[in-house]
Amino acid sequence: MENTACTSNDEDIIREEHLPNGDVYVGKFHGPVPHGFGKYTWSDGAIYEGEWDLSRITGKGQIVWQSGAVYEGEVVGGFLEGSGTLKGVDGSIYDGSWNMSKYYGMGMKTYPNSDVYEGNWKEGLQEGVGKYTWSNGTTYVGNWKRGKMSGKGVMQWKNGDLYNGYWHNGLMHGIGYYRYNDGIVYVGTWSKGLKDGQGILYPAESKIPCDPLFSELFGYTNSCPSVNFKGLCPEKIVFLILTLVRLCRRSPRISNGNVSVIEGGYALPQEGCNTASSSSGSKTDTENERDMVYEREYMQGVLIMERPRYWDELKAMSVKNRKKNLWRKQVKGPGETIYKGHKSYFLMLNLQLGIRYTVGKITPVPLREVRSSDFGPRARIRMYFPHEGTQYTPPHHSINFFWKDYCPMVFRNLREMFKIDAADYMMSICGGDSLKELSSPGKSGSIFYLSQDERFVIKTLKKTEVKVLLKMLPKYYVHVGAYENTLITKFFGLHRITLKSGRKVRFVVMGNMFRTELRIHRRYDLKGSTQGRFTKKENIKETTTLKDLDLTYVFYVEKSWREALFRQISLDCMFLESQSIIDYSMLLGIHFRAPEHLRSHLDQDTEPLESENPAACNSSDSVNPDEIFRQKGFLLVAHEPGSVSSAPGSHIRGSMVRASEAGDEEVDLVLPGTGRLRVQLGVNMPARACLKDQDITAVSDEDDTYKVYDVVLYLGIIDILQEYNVKKKIEHCVKSLKYDPLSISAVEPSLYAKRFMSFLEKVFPEQ
């Protein structure tokens, strides 16, 4: 090692030192270590020139890498920390805050293609409030999460279109306001970038103040000062927007003037929706109220309903009903979260306490085959839960109750059979989150609860239903064990809570067959009977479960899948018939795909979000073109277990279906914007929906006279706890005097099963 030095004193030594690995340091020393200002050159050519603190690169300095990238700013312990500017070899420039050599805090980045982002960063990705400007002039101002537009924000495209609303994972998702450059305005909901659900379209010539309607969707009134953006430069607009963000966080009220602010939010000009008084040549109030708007409903971008309405008719609707009917459930998801003070709050706490106790008690017991003694009403765990706790139970804040867990070993084995981890099961139902209460879709009066992660449905049962389930449980256990693709409801627990008042509430925990990343646009409860099996049109909403006579579609699936489906339905019906069960239904969920999704995602047009910045765009899953198989408008690819994006649910045990187009191999369904999904019997099944009495073979891609949709189907057999008992026999006799005996639901089990199968064969006809 060669040293050359010139000294002024022992505390301030400047010298050059060559290290054995070829690195060179020239600068100040404090004793034997670098301290003060110095220049360090690595053997690979990288250079740091700046401040040192007792051998640590700490302070202000400049780093030049061998690649040509240059950083100038603050450094701590060898990490980029504080504020600084990085110029990349690709021409990108970042100027802002750093933490552990990653973008963190406020900063501005200019990308190689001239896109610019200015706002908050976290761990190297956009996080928080920020503005992104594309090189083509498109701008977005709003919230970001993990590098994607998520939350509330405003985007204005280069062609003048403007969207103000909610985003998720880089796509419009939730309630929003879209103003086209020709003045047309649409207020509604989006799902993964596509209009999805109900909304209102305002024609370009409309003078109706659509801004107040959008405000009312969020429960706001009109009292925030109005701001006019006309004539302002973009920098001042951004400044005003960010100022409004801070102001609106203090007040939940928004404006009725030229600006609309979304809850905590963002502002945009309302040039296409001025009130009648804002124009000297406008209509009178009476004429204005008779202006026409259009109620619309979309399914994944497909317009399925449009109804002209006069504005005064819509205005007559109460704000409460409009929010309830059009928006609230679509944004927050199904069900009402049970809060403290809710009528079911203590019942929920008791249920969670009991399940946590019994699952925790049974899990340590070694797994074994079930015995005959594990079945029946006497196979149970009973415990008293006083609020102060005991040596066996924890103290709690609910009311005192008695707990009974039926057949714990049997249901433990069923959960294991369906690959449900005990810890996940408890966290899903008994974790920190509350359950959600669903309205009952049937006449049974049962109450339904949904876990926050939507994996499990909990249903209250009558005493007779508990007896039926306990009676059939031994055969049910054998049946689901023998047929992994069974469509019958999956049961995972049976419990009873007894309150001090003597009231008894019985629950069963089931798998949620609609637990999917896709939106379920239509739900049908199909029995095969016709008497009373319809829904009044005025009661139909997107979340309504429709009935047999409401179904206007038939569904075409691949021949081998149809054969497997009816083979399994036949086996399940034989089992139910052997248990004298009737009144069961096929619950059918339909997800409609948009026309944009019928093209290969390899050819998707991503404009105007097109950018070289991967943080600002959504990338599709990479798929080998050689592994792509066509199922009409869908993409089926060879199954890869590690690439499937769907979360585990109660259907994880079932085997995958095989596609003839893929050489009879297992396949995944590729959906742009969603990922790859396991295709199983009754789960993620692609099909074509066609109106009844329409010949699918006559439909061509160029023919617009036929209505054919690509759909994804979910189906399962539910409500399997009704025996054909004396009460049902009497019901059959009474109704047969008034109606056709074959049209009513209450018929003997063999006839019920035959009619059920026959009806479904018409719903899923052969191609």
Image: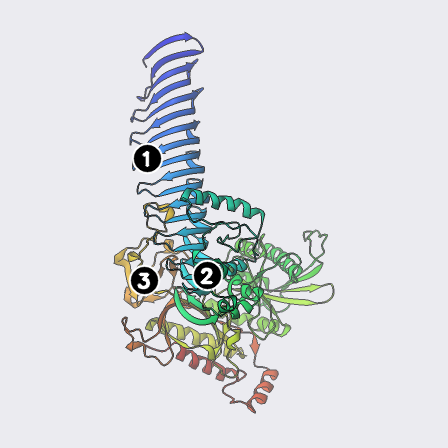
Q: Position of residue 323 (x, y in %)?
A: 54, 63
Gap in Å between the C-alphas at discs 1 and 3?
Answer: 39 Å
Q: Secondary structure at mark 1?
A: loop
Query: Which three-letter amino acid code belongs to the residue tagged 1?
Result: Gly
Q: Position of residue 180 (x, y in %)?
A: 39, 59
Q: Secondary structure at mark 3?
A: strand
Q: Position of residue 408 (x, y in %)?
A: 59, 62
Query: Which three-letter amino acid code belongs to the residue tagged 3?
Result: Leu
Q: Badge 3 local density, few (<14 within 10 Å), some, or many (20+)?
A: many
Report whether 403 appears left or right of 121: right
Which residue lies most toward the left here?
626
Q: Can the viewer see residue 547?
A: yes
In the picture, the disc for residue 635 is: 3
Closer to the chain start, of discs 1 and 3, is: 1
Query: Which three-letter amino acid code belongs to the residue tagged 2?
Result: Thr
Q: Badge 2 local density, few (<14 within 10 Å), some, or many (20+)?
A: many
Q: Quadrant of the N terminus?
A: top left
Which residue position holds label 1? 88
Q: Quadrant of the C terminus?
A: bottom left
In the picture, the disc for residue 189 is: 2
Q: To which quarter of the image does residue 758 belong? A: bottom left
Front-most of residues 94 and 476: 94
Q: To which quarter of the image does residue 383 belong? A: bottom right
